[in-house]
Amino acid sequence: MEEIKDQKDIERIQLEGLKWTVRHAYENCPFYKKQFDKAGVKPEDIKTLDDIKRLPFTEADDLREGYPFPLLSVPEEKVVRIHASSGTTGKKKILSYTQKDIDDWITFFARALKMAGIGPKDRVQIAVGYGLWTAGAGFQAAVERVGAMAIPVGPGNLDLQCQFLVDLQSTCICCTSSMALLLGEEVKRRGLRDKINVKTVIQGSERCSEAMRKAILDHLGAEHLFDITGLTELYGPGPGIDCKYHQGIHYWADYYILELLDPETFEPVKEGEIGEMVVTTLKKEASPLIRYRTRDLTRKISGPCPCGSAFPRHDRILGRSDDMIIFRGVNIYPGQIDEILSEIDGISSEYNIIVERRDAKDFMIIKVERDSAGDPAWDDDIKAKIQKEIKSKVMISADVQIVDYGALPRSERKSKRIFDNR
Ligand SMILES: [Zn+2]
């Protein structure tokens, strides 16, 4: 792997990779050839990084159409493995990997673990799903690659998780943020905090409020909580992670190009504004991605990071463009509400947003849990404060309801928090 020292290195690798990917896809994948022909663009038209704008988008639906081997760009005998996303509706999205794709993935995944300080002395409890899902296989191989001890427990099973945290003295736990909170609450309930040795939590694939982060760290007695990004279409987990300064997620710009676009107009958003992540891979052989719309929302973070890494940064995942709520003509991302609630004292990390239509008018109800030690006597003050903040930062009026701690549902997987009943 080449060393990346500055922006120039990245741009050189990106242009080389973009040209290779476009030609590879055009010559070897009938789907891409058809798309490029429709858009009137040929591989030789790509001369600068800016020419990426000429390429057509690829969508999740395109992957379902090409079932079972969508975007396949190599002869089938070069495919050594497939993975599939969980997919809530219809057929799963299946992605193919060559041996080089697997090696590339584990190489940059190991880079992510190293950025989180994971090495040979660590014992890593992997509490994510194995099987068709990319998470288990990816974490397993990357943990081994950095020389740490992999403890492949898989998701759920709080009894076994707690037992291993104590008996094996795991130093790191990898899971979703919902699972981390659930496990943290269980450790607290059983009074195990002083008997375990968790220093690092690596969590993926979910929006997580500041309050929830604090609760996870407190309950487990951990020092660092890292956000690892991940997408089955983009190999799996590992394409980005925050460093120990936690000022944004460094992403591996030598493996993919990240564009942030307005989900309505497809124009690049202004520096620092929220946009949809659109990715183009630079080295992927079996299922290359060209301007793939991930639907994940974030913003770019400019300037150098105190850690000195040359890899650029984006913010945490702030939600999905599918979750964007158009409320009385205003575009609202749940991440914005999340950020506001994180700043309010006296409430837990759980909330629900309910949108309803009454008499042809939109109404928003935000249910928020009182903190576990909270006093109902403060409810009116907290409610007024949240309503004022939402009014000033998101420019809408919402009806805030404070409910008892533990009243909102929790899940080991992704918790549903938005209920649009219109
Ligand atoms: Zn950094």
Image (tube, helix red, strand yellow):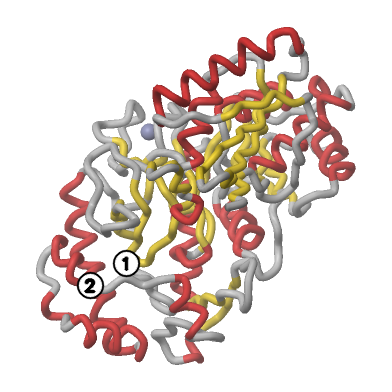
Query: In the rendered view of the protein, which quadrant contains the N terminus?
Result: bottom left
Residue 142's x, y, as percent?
A: 56, 54
Question: Residue shown at 47%/20% (left/top)?
Answer: 389
Q: Amino acid at mark 1?
A: Arg
Tell me the quarter of the picture where residue 272 sits. top left
Question: Is 295 in front, or is 151?
Answer: 295
Residue at 49% x, 29% y: name it. 397
Using residue 281 as the reference point, say whether residue 176 is left or right of it.
Answer: right
Residue shown at the point (66%, 20%) measured from the top left: 347
In the image, residue 254 sits, relative to residue 350, either above or below, namely below
Residue of label 1: 291
**Pointer 2 local density, CA inside 10 Å: few below 14, some 14–19, many at least 20:** some
Q: Residue 100: image x %, image y %?
A: 44, 73
- Looking at the image, tell me whether mark 2 or mark 1 is earlier in sequence order: 2
Quarter of the image for residue 178 reads: top right
Q: Is residue 116 visible?
A: yes
**Marks 2 and 1, Cα distance to the nearest angstrom?**
7 Å
In the image: residue 153, left or right of residue 41: right
User: Is residue 270 rendered to the left or right of residue 401?
Assistant: left
Q: Which amino acid, mark 2? A: Leu
Q: Is residue 54 above or below residue 308?
A: below
Q: Which residue is mark 2?
A: 55
SS of the residue under disc 2: loop
Residue 110 can be seen in this image: no
Position of residue 241 relative to residue 188, above or below, is: below
Quadrant housing residue 382: top right
